[in-house]
Amino acid sequence: MADFADDADPEQFAAETGNVVQFPAAKEGKAPEIVSFNRRELDQILRIYGNKVADGEWRDYAIDMLKDRAVFSVFKRAAEVPLYRIEKNPKFARKQGAWSIVSASGQILKRGHELQAVLRIFESKPRLYQV
């Protein structure tokens, strides 16, 4: 049996086109597609995540790359339901926008075409401190 890493051309098995990564074709001849985050998108999401971790609000995250959408889930504790899900769904790109923030109850809190605009929901508002 041939070694996969030595004999395979990486472009043949993982041709990245935009935000969709294509893997080797199945027996039916159709390659499955997976939606993923690109480096810029992950940078924006992880910047917000880092700020919330520093504030003690969030503790863990998970990234799921599915056929129809990519999901960044945020947890207060690892064994819980996610507090928020940041979803990228290209199917809605022309309609409401590919990006959405979904709460733990499943309610869509914000939706839009630009990730930066959607992530503003997590920006901290100025607080007044009593002395």
Image (cartoon, helix red, strand yellow):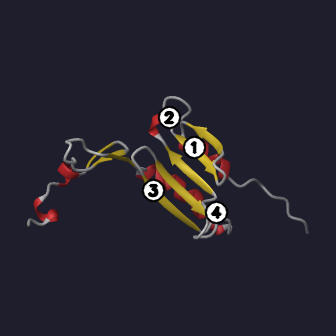
Look at the numbered disc 3 and give the secondary structure of its residue.
Answer: strand
Where is the N terminus found, in terms of image quarters?
bottom left
Q: Which residue is mark 1?
A: 100
Q: Are marks 2 and 1 in contact (CB under 8 Å)?
A: yes
The earlier-in-sequence mark between 4 and 2 is 4
Q: Which residue is mark 2?
A: 92
Q: Amino acid at mark 3?
A: Asp
Mark 3 to mark 4 CA distance (whole Å): 20 Å
Few, some or many residues within 10 Å of mark 1 (<14, 14–19, 20+): many
Quadrant for residue 33, please give it. Answer: top left
Q: Which residue is mark 4?
A: 52
The earlier-in-sequence mark between 1 and 3 is 3
Q: Amino acid at mark 4?
A: Lys
Look at the numbered disc 4 and give the secondary structure of its residue.
Answer: helix
**Which of the pair 27/79 is nearer the observer?**
27
The earlier-in-sequence mark between 4 and 1 is 4
Residue drawn at x 58%, y 63% is 50
Mark 1 to mark 3 CA distance (whole Å): 15 Å
Few, some or many residues within 10 Å of mark 3 (<14, 14–19, 20+): some
Q: Which is closer to the viewer, label 4 or label 1? A: 1
Which residue lies most toward the right here? 131
Look at the numbered disc 2 and give the secondary structure of its residue.
Answer: helix
Horizontal relation, residue 42 to residue 96: left or right: left
Q: Give how far across and how far down residue 56 sits, in percent.
A: 68, 69
Few, some or many residues within 10 Å of mark 2 (<14, 14–19, 20+): some
